[in-house]
Image (cartoon, rainbow, N blue to C red):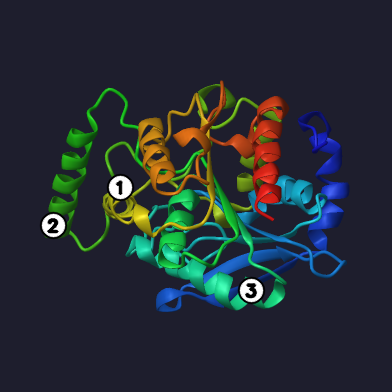
Amino acid sequence: MFNPESSLDDTLPGEISVFWKKGLFDLFSGIDGVSIHYAQFIQEQANRPTIIIVPGRCESYLKYQELSFDLYCQGYNIFIIDHRGQGLSGRMLKNHNKGYVVKFQDYVDDLHNFIDNIVTPQSSEKPYLLAHSMGGTIATRFMQDCPNAIKAAVISSPMLGFYSGLLPNSIAKILVAIKLKLNNIISTTPWYFFGQKDYFAKSFSDNKLTHSIQRYHYFVDLYEKNKVIQLGGVTTHWLAQSIAAQKELFTKITHLKTPILLLQARADSIVCQQAQDNFCQQLHALQPQSCPGGVPSRIDNAFHELFFETDDLREQAITQSLAWFTQHN
């Protein structure tokens, strides 16, 4: 039904490349004049439904060629945004490797600008949102600010809380606050958080993003050939802004009106699954059409990047997403 990983070596330079070349690639001026790049793919047939892809941290729309192809083949117009500070969009620090944003709300406002001024004028009806990881937080905050803008949304492995391993989450947050205060006292340059550094490609055996060796090697090669999209670890400032955004998201959960499906990768060690569980339980109690049964839609054995997983896991994520959109047509 969707492009198989076994054929990537043929379809990427073949069918997918032909499709990709038909896209429009442009930019607009975001908050504080930062250039925000995006890609769009419009069906030849008029009045087709639209999906906006909202990527995660470190990602670029260039990484989403296969998924865009699969969704376009299902009859959707596709729009993808590159967030500020990553991908092809403008960076705010001298060291372009550092994950940084002045305010998390800047991501949200850029998405708002993108939807209002780029997507809506080219759409015959309200769009759907398909958002991953950090993009899930951005998309959810946008839907809280604009509760009637989106027809339905799927948030995949959303960054609603961070996975801190054996370290209690409360202690991790204290460490972030202490290091941020120290950073602000000593230097005007945002520091990396503990253990974070410039971009480097992990071996497949060390990665916690996907079980698909073909798809993993595809995006490692992509980042090697397009060094401009490389991004390293996060700054303490970015972490503090993200933690504040996560808190705000839960505080404003009553603002959500859009039907939301949350896809949970059960082997995810990047973001906090308990935060996703809590979100679904609270949202379903307020809005029964979201998070059916009050729980995430769980995909067993999957790592963080559901849309780049092995075929059996990826197909579950795409099929459930498309079914959700069809249900809310």
Q: Mark 1: give few (<14), some (14-19) or many (20+) Cα within 10 Å.
A: many
Horizontally, is 141 left or right of 155 in the view?
left
Marks 3 and 2: which is nearer the front? 3
Badge 2 is on which residue? 186
* N-terminal-most mark, 3 or 1: 3
* Front residue of 293 and 122: 293
The dot on residue 192 is: 1
The image quarter containing residue 205 is top right
Badge 3 is on which residue? 120
Quote the CA–CA distance across marks 2 and 1.
14 Å
Quote the CA–CA distance across marks 3 and 1.
37 Å
- Inspect the image, locate mark 3, and give the three-letter code of the amino acid beneath it: Thr
- Inspect the image, locate mark 2, and give the three-letter code of the amino acid beneath it: Ile
* N-terminal-most mark, 3 or 2: 3
Is disc 1 placed on a helix, strand or loop?
loop
- Inspect the image, locate mark 1, and give the three-letter code of the amino acid beneath it: Tyr
Query: Quick check: can you spot residue 30?
Result: yes
Picture quarter with the N terminus: top right
Quote the CA–CA distance across marks 3 and 2.
45 Å
At x 32%, y 56%, the residue is 252
Where residue 299 appears, as percent x and y from the top left, is 57, 27
Mark 3 touches mark 2? (CB < 8 Å)? no
At x 57%, y 70%, the residue is 115
Mark 3 touches mark 1? (CB < 8 Å)? no
Where residue 10 appears, as percent x and y from the top left, is 86, 38
At x 48%, y 56%, the residue is 139
* N-terminal-most mark, 2 or 1: 2
